[in-house]
Image: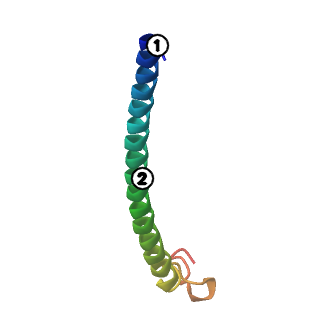
Amino acid sequence: MTPQELAALIARIDELEMKQAFQEQTIDDLNAEIAAHQLTLEKMRTQMKFLVERVRSVSGSNIAKDSEETPPPHY
């Protein structure tokens, strides 16, 4: 192997090592982002459950039924 070929091979190996290091960093960053999103989703699910239970527990609306309504004053 000539010195030029060896230098080219070393340069390619260095480039591959740099790419691999950047890929590892990108994977770590993406993993952290996914974990943060998962926590946010869990929080939102908990809040949604609370809201659904709260809405279900509300007993009817504030509007009375027609049979219970008092007639307007002009009658």
Mark 2 falls on what kind of element?
A: helix
Residue located 47% across and 76% down the image: 49
Camera-nearest residue between 50 and 4? 4
For residue 31, the mark is 2
Q: Is residue 20 above or below residue 14?
A: below
Q: Residues within 10 Å of mark 1 (few under 14, many from 20)?
A: few
Amino acid type, callout 2? Asn
Residue located 38% across and 57% down the image: 36
Q: CA distance from mark 1 to mark 2?
A: 43 Å
Camera-nearest residue between 40 and 66? 40
Amino acid type, callout 1? Thr
The mark lying in front, picked from 1 and 2, is: 1
For residue 2, the mark is 1
For residue 35, the mark is none
Q: Position of residue 70 (x, y in %)?
A: 53, 84
Q: Is residue 56 above or below residue 7?
A: below
Q: Are marks 1 and 2 in contact (CB under 8 Å)?
A: no
Residue located 42% across and 26% down the image: 15
Q: Residues within 10 Å of mark 2 (few under 14, many from 20)?
A: few
Mark 1 falls on what kind of element?
A: loop
Q: Position of residue 47 (x, y in %)?
A: 42, 71
Residue located 46% across and 13% down the image: 2
Q: Quadrant of the C terminus?
A: bottom right
For the rendered model, the colour scheme is rainbow
